[in-house]
Image (tube, rainbow, N blue to C red):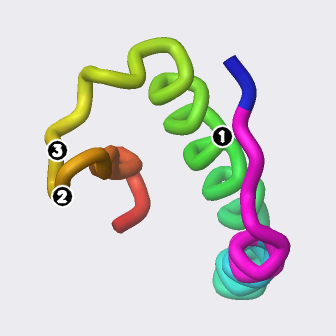
Amino acid sequence: MRFSSHPEAEAEFYAAVDYYEHCEAGLGYDFFVEVYSTISQILNHPAAWPVVDEDIRRCLTNRFP
């Protein structure tokens, strides 16, 4: 399975990576890995997450709120 993201969401994601990297060296990389690991879990098990509204499910990252 593949995924895509809206260009504005992708820009916001990379801004968050930069923010975390500015807070502490390596933290931006950790955030990047955590998000992509979570996306991988979603792609492997798309129905495993709780439904929050009709056909929308929510999966949170483990380390970053």
Give the residue type at disc 2.
Answer: Asp
Q: Residue at x 33, y 45 (%)?
A: 59
Residue hosting label 3: 51
Whole-angstrom CA distance, mark 1 to mark 2, is 23 Å
Residue hosting label 1: 36
Disc 3 vs disc 2: Cβ atoms closer than 8 Å?
yes
Whole-angstrom CA distance, mark 3 to mark 2, is 6 Å
Task: Please provide the residue range marked out in magenta.
Answer: 3-13
Residue 51 % position (x, y):
16, 44
Q: Which residue is drawn at 74% across and 26% down?
A: 2
Residue hosting label 2: 53
Whole-angstrom CA distance, mark 1 to mark 3, is 21 Å
The crowding category of the residue bearing disc 1, from other C-alpha atoms within 10 Å (few below 14, some 14 to 19, many at least 20), is few
Give the residue type at disc 1.
Answer: Tyr
* N-terminal-most mark, 1 or 2: 1
Q: Is mark 1 on a helix, strand or loop?
A: helix
Q: Is mark 3 on a helix, strand or loop?
A: strand
Q: What element carries label 2?
A: strand
Give the residue type at disc 3.
Answer: Val
- Magenta span contains residue 33: no
The C terminus, quarter of image: bottom left
Nearer to the camera, 27 or 54: 54
* N-terminal-most mark, 1 or 3: 1
Q: Which callout, 1 or 3, points to the residue nearer the camera?
A: 3
Residue 12 % position (x, y):
71, 81
Determine whether, in the image, residue 34 is placed left or right of residue 42: right
Q: Which residue is drawn at 76% across and 47% down?
A: 4
The N terminus, quarter of image: top right
Most distant residue in the front direction: 54
User: In terms of image quadrants, where is residue 31?
Assistant: bottom right
- Magenta span contains residue 10: yes
